[in-house]
Image (spheres, helix red, strand yellow):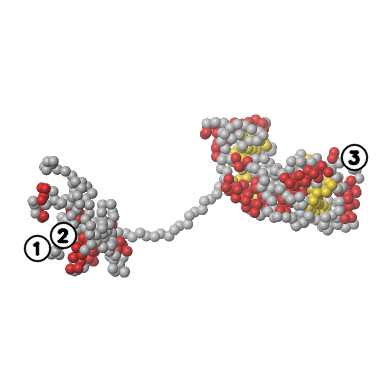
Amino acid sequence: MNDSTSRKTLSLKPKAGAASPETADGERRKRSGARARQAAMQERAQHARGEAPAPEAPEARSSERRPARPAARDERPGAPRAERAGRGERTEKTDRAGRPGRPGRPERAVRLGQSERPNRAERGRPAGDRPVRARDADRRGPADRPSRPRQESGRLREPETVAAAARPFPDEDADAHPRIQRRPRTPRTPRVAETFHVFAPCPHGLEEALSLELLALGYENVTAGRAGCRFQADWTGILRANLYSRLATRILVQVAQADVHTEDDILELARRTEWERWFGPDDSLRVDTSAIHSPMRSLQYCNLRAKDGICDRLREREGARPDIDTVRPDARVHLFLDERQATLYLDVSGESLFKRGWRLDKGEAPLRENLAAGLLALSGWAPDAPLLDPFCGSGTILIEAAWIALGVPPGIWRPFGFERLRPHDARLWRNLKEDARAHIAPRLEQPLVGGDVNPAAIEAARANIDRAHLSPDTIRFEVCDARRLPPPADAGWIVTNPPYGERLGDHDAELWPQWATQLKQHYGGWQLNIITSDLDLPGQLRLKARRRHPLHNGALDCRLFQFDLVSAGYRDR
């Protein structure tokens, strides 16, 4: 092979020979590497304090010949942490990968043709005449490097981090290097929940009882109106109203209201409302309209204009119109008209709230569940008192009383319309129901008794008990005539919906006088409450009502008569 051909080989760095502390001409030995940088920083720190650099001990000068020791720690226990961190930045010789070099072993060159040996062109030159390469300049001490321009303060230009680490005290030069100030934490402003105006309709005559119920549930600004109550609540309060209200028929959330003069005004009002917030074109829709003293001629046409406005809004915003479903819609909207205004409500209940989900066998004269709960509220019955219904039918009044006494929320076992709306929070709703179930009592302390002469009605009542998630011994049902039914306790309440009109028939004309005799002889101290559409019933019982409450059982105009029974007669209080 030709010797003149230059080849790049991987060579080992030769071990440096031991050098004397002083050179031949008496100059100070030149140092390089991490030890040189550490000494330079110490000198700059002393210069900043205005101290003269201490003479270097022979042991320190000869330390270059010793193997590299572990990272030097600050001997002064009270030295600032920043100074110790700055001076302990790199105290060992490290390879190019950042690993500490092993003492006593030569380092390998990492690039081909860049060994520590001088090349052929430099072999003949003296050591001082050789050109200084960048790599060699890094290994030499500060004395070998070219001098840098100094600042006016006499301090070397250096990176901010090195200068800060070299300062012995952090308080010096505070203007040039401001300290970090700790500011006190300001409490985060709590998120204010959106408040909605809500209307809860109920049967006529239960408005005052409903307002008391809503106040007991913790709602504010409750106002009793015609066939319902108005109040304000956030979204969680709306869910709780659906879950706990026993008297309301629905929960309607107001979404828009404006003065209207023609049917086209209803169209524009519906078009301006943000329906996309609640449902979309993939959800089915139903619109209902009711009015009181409205100047509009056709409620059906008003209903159509409101529906068109909703569909136009969703088509403009989301590109499609929702389908109309009058049986099981995903979203229900109610339009209410009065003398000058139109109000749009979003029905968040879905099916009416009196549908608890347990009654399938209704009997001959069904009584709605919220009306049955209203009778118990108006009668003054306490949940810890005995209760009797001698004309129980399918057991609606007694099952409602059992749920009230046990603390079972009326909406715990049924679905709701808000579960299909866009803002529904399934976790929040699940937590509300779990909290409600945790407060249900295990059993009743006082007897609940029901009787009826119809065996089929008693069978239907027992089936309803099972669907209401009640144990069979919660309510005692008996096939018995009310004229021979003994009292289950010394005192209590009788709340009943007796037969009247076509249900009574001509063959039971003596029912009322005979039953009144049974009551006077065996039920002294009991409270009697009867709902009926027969306004002459108190005269047939030969009893005088203490109070009358006007009520509506569906389309029937009824009264709730209240009597105080005494032994061997009746005394008006």
Q: Is residue 106 above or below residue 511?
A: below
Tag on residue 17?
2
Q: How far across and how far down the image is residue 465, in percent?
A: 75, 47
Which part of the image, by quadrant, shows the C terminus?
bottom right
- Foreground of the two, 412 or 29: 29
Circle nearer the N terminus (3, 2): 2
Q: Quadrant of residue 293?
A: top right
- The answer to whether one can see residue 16 in this image is yes
CA distance for labels 3 and 2 = 134 Å
What residue did someone put label 3 on?
506
Which amino acid, by three-letter code, is at mark 1? Ala
Instruction: Please name which of the two marks, 3 or 1, marks the residue nearer to the observer.
Output: 1
Which part of the image, by quadrant, shows the N terminus?
top left
Q: Residue at x 78, y 52 (%)?
A: 448
Tag on residue 148?
none
What residue did someone put label 1 on?
24
CA distance for labels 1 and 2 = 16 Å
Secondary structure of the residue carrying tag 3 is: loop
Mark 2 crowdedness (10 Å alpha carbons): few <14, some 14-19, many ≥20: few
